[in-house]
Each structure stands twice: as structure tokens, then as C-alpha cells.
Amino acid sequence: MKSNIRVIVLGLIIHNNRLFVSEGFDSIKQETFYRALGGGVEFGETSQAALQREFQEELQAELTNIRYLGCLESFFTFEGEPGHELVQLYQCDFVDARFYQEQSFTFIEGDDQGVAHWIDLDLLKSNSLRLCPDNCLTYLLV
């Protein structure tokens, strides 16, 4: 069992009432969920630098209009294991307009491959689709 707190950074990118998210699946809960893209903050790295690095590594994407929103604390269970994260949350935009034109993208995260989608904000706000961390949704309701 893990007993450490992970510091991560997530970037909320909103365009035409859609949010750019990665899709995840918990095989134990048999549940699909969505999360803004980002990743771990490394020792000695600012959260903004980590955000830019993660988007570069995963999508070869540059970000602009980066604005800090706040810090969330997230307690969760994934694949039967408890987790605890401090989430540095940013709102930002893609530099390259092609990211707004495609519906989905394949990205690399470590040794795994993932899929990122544009999801209609109304589906997230109505809880038809689950956005993680759960309290991230409050930043989309303003």
C-alpha cells in the first residue's frame, strides 16, 4: 500500500464548450473516467514548468495563456489502491490550432499509450461523464 502524497499538475483547456481530457478506466470498479492532461511535478521543478513539460512529452504540444487556478487535494481509489494527490490546476490554451480541429489524439505516457478527447462540458456538468478529481468540476462552473 502506498503511503505518499503525489504532487501533480493538470491543465484545463476549454474550447467551444468542450474540455480536453484523457480517458481512463478502473478495471476493478468497471468505470470509465476522464481527467485533464498533466502529470507529476519533479523535485526542483515549478508546477507551471511541469505542465509545459508534460504536454510537450505526451502530445508534442506547446501551451500559451497559462493561468494558475488553485490547488486541489484529492483522495481516491484506483485499481483497488488508495491514492492521495495535491493537484496544481491551471487553465491554458494550445499554441497549435490543429489541436482544436481534431476530436481525439493518441499520446504517450511513460510506457503506456493513452487517448485524449474533446468532451462536451455539459456532459461533465450533468455528471453523465465522470471528471477526476471530482472537485475539479467546480473550476469549470465559473
Image (cartoon, rainbow, N blue to C red):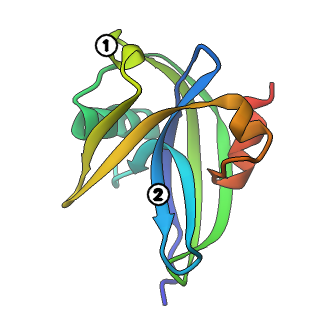
Q: Is residue 134 left or right of residue 120?
A: right
The quarter holding residue 17 reads top right
Q: Is residue 38 left or right of residue 129?
A: left
Who is closer to the viewer here, 119 or 36?
119
Kindly identify the amino acid type of the residue bearing the numbered disc 2: Gly
Which residue of the protein is positioned furthest toward the bottom in this rendering?
A: 1
Which residue of the protein is positioned furthest toward the left in this rendering?
A: 111
Q: Residue at x 42, y 16 (%)?
A: 100
Q: Residue at x 27, y 42 (%)?
A: 107
Q: Is residue 94 above or below residue 132?
A: above
Who is closer to the viewer here, 46 or 9?
9
Look at the image and tell me whether residue 66 can be seen.
yes
Q: Is residue 40 above or below residue 139?
A: below
The quarter holding residue 63 reads top left
Image position, residue 104 (x, y; %): 37, 32
Image position, residue 25 (x, y; %): 48, 64
Disc 2: which residue: 24
Disc 1: which residue: 98
